[in-house]
Amino acid sequence: MSDYYTDTEPQWDDADSGTDTQPEPVKAARRSSGTRARGRRRSRTLVTSGQAETVLDRYEALSAATADELSAVAAVLGSTEHDVRTLTVTVVAGAGVKHAQAMEDLLDVAGRDNADRDMAALTLAVGPAGIKRLRAAWDLAQALSDGADTLDTNPVQAARQLAGAAVDVEDVLSTARVLLG
């Protein structure tokens, strides 16, 4: 809709001498509820320069990652998508890391001395939700290693399996934690 209204036909005044001039256009009243102006102001400051830099930094970091590292980030996030753009949006939008505890458990077990790994893995199975926690760590390790092994039902044997799996995925998980961080 135009801000100005012009009459296309000449307006003649009866008292006029009959000159052939067209009157000046009449300016229409402008309707403004103020919401458009407020909306424009808000849209200009939706993203600060610091936030934009954070998104671009995260995008660049994920772009430099290997396919295995991107798969690890996707697995920890609980995402089925492995492309850099989707992962960047997921990470910076704060959707949450679905398997953060499992990642931390695996990194904790892998970071222990050889003699302590089995025991650290076994402590995951302690408590009312312990076996679920051990299984969650196992499932993440299997997703990262494309393994199809089943977890032993014996908690001691399961802990040994988890200790070995944790060592196998330690490097890629360490990188994933940095990329998510």
Image (cartoon, grey):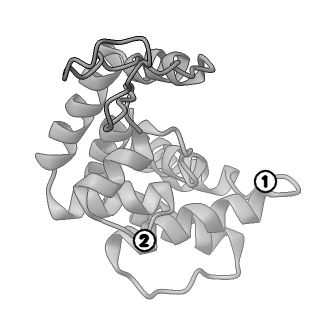
What numbered label is drawn on residue 37? none
* Residue 50 in the image, given as x and y percentages of width and height: 31, 14
Q: Amino acid at mark 2?
A: Thr
* Residue 123 in the image, given as x and y percentages of width and height: 69, 50
How much space separates mark 1 and mark 2, taking CA atoms? 31 Å
- Among the 4 quarters of the image, the one containing residue 157: bottom right
- Picture layout, residue 41 above or below residue 166: above
The residue lying furthest to the left in this view is 64
The residue that appears at 39% across and 29% down in the rendered structure is 5
Give the quarter of the figure containing the C terminus: top left
The reply to whether residue 173 is visible in this rendering is no
Q: Earlier in the sequence, mark 1 or mark 2?
A: 2
Name the element at disc 1.
loop
Closer to the eye: label 1 or 2: 2
Give the quarter of the figure containing the N terminus: top left
Q: Amino acid at mark 1?
A: Val
* Residue 37 in the image, given as x and y percentages of width and height: 49, 17
The residue indicated by pointer 1 is 126
The residue that appears at 42% across and 71% down in the rendered structure is 80
- Among the 4 quarters of the image, the one containing residue 128: bottom right
- Identify which residue, 12 or 60, lies in the foreground: 12
The residue that appears at 52% across and 38% down in the rendered structure is 94
In the image, is 28 to the left or to the right of 82? right
Name the element at disc 2.
loop
Number of other residues with Cα within 10 Å of mark 2, as a class: few under 14, some 14 to 19, many 20 or more: few
The residue that appears at 19% across and 23% down in the rendered structure is 20
The residue indicated by pointer 2 is 80
